[in-house]
Image: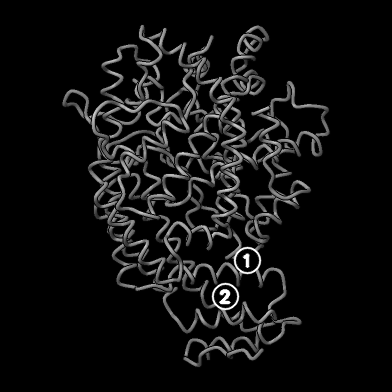
């Protein structure tokens, strides 16, 4: 087919002249030369802006200052403006559709650039308004602190109460405090949903949920099928595990099982297993330094993180985001995490998890093109994070890292294994709530979402709703605002983590089973991930990367074998 040339303007003219003097064409055809020029021009503008925004965003999450959020908004809009040029988008689309750009790295960069431009082919004023509103909600969320008896409390304190406190009245107050921010932001959030849907419809999609999945190289139909399968596979085991848990909790609080309500579980959303069995895993971490344990562990497998930790903000402070995340600031090596560390199992898991994200970014091959120094897909970096996060409940890992005796190891072996299995099945049920709820939100934001939320919680998590008219406490889950239509990727990450676990045990380490293997002090683990996952970055489509790293495409069978059967 005929292809268009690059627009003739001073910038492109200069690039075209320079192009004849730079030996980077090799055997490129005309379309590939155009593609390379287009990429060079885009990266020259995008790279410094992205780094500036990365630093500004991280600072805003630490300080909570309005001026810092204003800077983020300004830079985000500048970046979005790069993608608004309709002529450039049409050229990118034409180059992609020509079938002439076949060189692997060029073709992959072109595909990534096409998807990035596609997300901005919308009303620029509405897009700007939606970005402004999202940042406003995030700022309000990060600065909000719930109250107990008139006293402001941090999420760290709420988690402490919900995992240790026996006073049921205080537990309920803490749970309600964790939800207060939801009603405070829900009106703005629903306005944001309407804006997002309008933007998606301008791009030819029925709603924002379908749009984001499609540009993320996924499909609603495939995910619906997968989550229906997970529901069927996990509902029986979950009912049995939860019935046992409910008996323990009811006895612990001196009430009947039918009286259990959300605040009796040890997490505001019941997305983590309460530590109520024969041993409380927190006791093993209470006298440890969770941050140092992470530094020692990752160094032992050949992916040191001491530089990441040195750049990171790790402890609670006013105005700071109360949760945790990892961030690749600039794609040139400045990788950080944000955390609010406490020495307990929750934060051991969280730190291992976030540093999993961080090493994925740190160890991208710097020789790969800039546009490919990303994860193959958001769920593949989640898979790495989950692969390592699971270790906080692995008895063999705990023995090695915490220097436990054989007697201590034997004491916690069965309990730690039970916690881990329950956690994985519980998370699958929680992911069913999040996926189905968010899909429904974007399909019809005017419906009674407060009631729908509890309908889904009761169906999938078997948690009884509180008495009275339901409020918008569900909106206290920041993912709805900050990471829309994303939560299913966590579940896909769990599936892939199990697939990698199976492959490494059987094909890299060549062990008969994973029994007694602690995943510590073995550089072959880091070497495997650097070569097959971290290094290539986004060079391959996510399923091709998985096939190359495990010998088969993504499958649920290893997760089911590991945790369900």
Q: Quadrant of the N terminus?
A: bottom right
Display coloring: one colour
Residue at 22% x, 43% y: name it. Answer: 184
From mark 2 to mark 1, how far is it between C-alphas?
Answer: 10 Å
Is residue 239 in view from this perspective? yes
Residue at 28% x, 58% y: name it. Answer: 133
* Quarter where residue 240 is shown: top right
Q: Say which element carries label 2.
A: helix
Percent x, y of residue 116: 50, 68
> Which residue was labeled with disc 1?
369
Upstream in the sequence, badge 2 or badge 1?
A: 2
* Side of 172 where 516 appears, left or right: right
Q: Nearer the viewer, residue 422 or 143?
A: 422
> Which residue was labeled with disc 2?
39
Percent x, y of residue 315: 38, 33
Is residue 424 in view from this perspective? no
Relative vertical location of residue 221 with respect to residue 505 in this rendering, above or below: below
Q: Quadrant of the C terminus?
A: top right
Q: Say which element carries label 1.
A: loop
User: Dot 2, crowdedness within 10 Å: few (<14), some or many (≥20)?
Assistant: some
* Side of 522 where 448 appears, left or right: left
Relative vertical location of residue 519 with respect to residue 475 in this rendering, above or below: above
Residue at 54% x, 9% y: name it. Answer: 278
User: Dot 1, crowdedness within 10 Å: few (<14), some or many (≥20)?
Assistant: some
Percent x, y of residue 407: 65, 6
* Side of 314 where 3 appears, left or right: right
Q: Nearer the viewer, residue 431 or 81?
A: 431
Relative vertical location of residue 286 with respect to residue 535 in this rendering, above or below: above
Check if mark 2's residue and mark 1's residue have beta carbons within 8 Å.
yes
């Amino acid at each position: 087919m005929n292809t268009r040339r690059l627009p003739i303007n001073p910038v492109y003219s200069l690039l075209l002249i320079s192009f004849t003097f730079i030996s980077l064409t090799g055997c490129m055809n005309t379309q590939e030369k155009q593609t390379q020029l287009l990429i060079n021009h885009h990266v020259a503008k995008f790279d410094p802006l992205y780094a500036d925004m990365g630093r500004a965003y991280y600072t805003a999450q630490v300080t909570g200052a309005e001026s810092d959020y204003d800077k983020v908004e300004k830079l985000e809009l500048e970046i979005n403006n790069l993608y608004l040029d309709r002529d450039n988008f049409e050229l990118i689309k034409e180059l992609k559709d020509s079938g002439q750009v076949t060189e692997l790295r060029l073709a992959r960069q072109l595909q990534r650039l096409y998807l990035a431009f596609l997300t901005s082919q919308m009303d620029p004023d509405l897009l700007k308004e939606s970005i402004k509103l999202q940042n406003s909600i995030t700022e309000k969320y990060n600065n909000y602190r719930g109250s107990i008896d008139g006293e402001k409390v941090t999420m760290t304190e709420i988690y402490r109460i919900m995992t240790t406190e026996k006073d049921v009245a205080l537990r309920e107050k803490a749970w309600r405090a964790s939800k207060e921010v939801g009603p405070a932001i829900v009106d703005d959030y629903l306005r944001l949903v309407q804006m997002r849907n309008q933007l998606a419809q301008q791009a030819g999609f029925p709603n924002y949920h379908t749009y984001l999945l499609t540009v993320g190289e996924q499909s609603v139909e495939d995910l619906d099928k997968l989550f229906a399968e997970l529901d069927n596979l996990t509902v029986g085991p979950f009912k049995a595990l939860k019935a046992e848990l409910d008996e323990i909790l009811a006895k612990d609080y001196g009430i009947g099982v039918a009286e259990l309500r959300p605040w009796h579980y040890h997490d505001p959303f019941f997305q983590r297993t309460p530590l109520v069995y024969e041993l409380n895993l927190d006791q093993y971490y209470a006298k440890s330094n969770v941050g140092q344990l992470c530094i020692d562990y990752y160094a032992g497998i050949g992916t040191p993180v001491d530089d990441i930790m040195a750049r990171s903000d790790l402890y609670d402070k006013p105005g700071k985001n109360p949760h945790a995340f990892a961030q690749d600031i600039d794609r040139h090596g400045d990788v950080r995490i944000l955390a609010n560390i406490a020495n307990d199992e929750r934060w051991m898991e969280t730190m291992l998890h976030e540093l999993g994200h961080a090493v994925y970014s740190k160890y991208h091959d710097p020789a790969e093109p800039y546009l490919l120094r990303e994860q193959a897909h958001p769920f593949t970096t989640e898979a790495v994070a989950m692969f390592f996060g699971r270790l906080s409940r692995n008895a063999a890992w705990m023995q090695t890292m915490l220097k436990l005796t054989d007697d201590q190891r034997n004491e916690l072996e069965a309990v730690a294994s039970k916690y881990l299995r329950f956690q994985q099945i519980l998370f699958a049920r929680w992911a069913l709530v999040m996926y189905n709820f968010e899909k429904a939100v974007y399909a019809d934001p005017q419906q009674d979402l407060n009631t729908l939320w509890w309908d889904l919680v009761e169906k999938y998590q078997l948690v009884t709703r509180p008495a009275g008219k339901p409020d918008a406490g569900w909106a206290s889950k920041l993912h709805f605002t900050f990471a829309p239509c994303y939560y299913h990727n966590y579940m896909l990450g769990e599936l892939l983590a199990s697939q990698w676990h199976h492959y490494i045990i059987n094909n890299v380490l060549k062990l008969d089973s994973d029994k007694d293997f602690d995943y510590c002090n073995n550089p072959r683990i880091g070497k495997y991930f650097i070569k097959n996952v971290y290094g290539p970055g986004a060079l391959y489509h996510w399923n091709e990367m998985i096939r190359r790293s495990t010998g088969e495409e993504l499958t649920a069978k290893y997760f089911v074998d590991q945790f369900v059967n």
